[in-house]
Amino acid sequence: MTTKGHISAALILFVLFAAYGFQATTIPMFPGQEFEPFKPRTMPLLLAGAGLLLCVIRILQLMRAPQGEVRESVFAAFDWKPAGLLCLTMLAYGFAMIPLGFLLSTTLFLTAGFYVLGERRLTMLLGVSSSFSLVFYLLMTQALGLYLSPGLWWGA
């Protein structure tokens, strides 16, 4: 990719982060929240600001680089297959949460994630994922008093 292509990509990201930051300003708040230090808008605005800053830094780097001296991206050597599979497992986790409930869907998600990352011992896959899911479930429900859905299939 040429320097112009890299600058164009950075400018497109800049526009997307600016639009995201603009949309973050429209997040509704409850009365009185405007005086709190951490509001519903805080993290989205910080993410948008960080993205804008990184885009500006990258554009300035590219503008200062001599023509033809732009290095290839470090992402060219990245192993995309496990990353894509992990994204698919996260998507499946989101869809499985309501019918299967927190405990079972989290156990399946962690098992699939460990498998994608290379773990093949069944005792390690099931043991770690189920014990972590159970401890986290108990911590959230018993210690913090949060409600985590048991799932439609479990409750039926």
Image: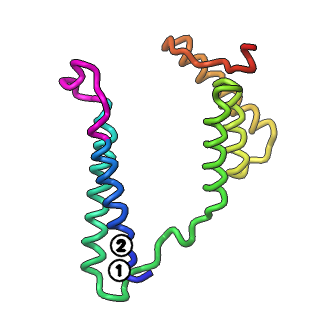
What is the CA distance from the residue labelled 2 to the residue labelled 1? 6 Å
Q: Position of residue 76 (x, y in %)?
A: 54, 72
Mark 1: secondary structure: helix
Q: Which residue extends farthest left?
A: 35
The front one of 22 and 58 is 22
Mark 2: secondary structure: helix
For residue 4, the mark is: 1
Instruction: Check if residue 33 falls in the magenta segment.
Output: yes
The amino acid marked with disc number 1 is Lys
Which residue is at 46% across, 73% downward? 73
The main secondary structure of the magenta stretch is loop
Q: Which residue extends farthest right?
A: 122
Relative vertical location of residue 53 with respect to residue 114 in this rendering, above or below: below
Going by the image, does 5 lie left or right of 155? left
Q: Which residues are magenta?
A: 24-39
Q: Is disc 1 surrounded by few (<14), some (14 to 19) or many (20+) residues within 10 Å?
A: few
Which residue is at 62% across, 43% downward? 91
Going by the image, does 57 lie left or right of 101? left
- Residue pointed to by mark 2: 8
Which residue is at 68% across, 21% downward? 151
Q: Position of residue 9 (x, y in %)?
A: 39, 69
Q: Is disc 2 surrounded by few (<14), some (14 to 19) or many (20+) residues within 10 Å?
A: few
Dots 2, 1 in contact, CB < 8 A: yes
- Say which quadrant the C terminus sits in: top right
Q: Position of residue 154 (x, y in %)?
A: 74, 17
Q: Position of residue 3 (x, y in %)?
A: 36, 81
Instruction: Check if residue 51 falls in the magenta segment.
Output: no
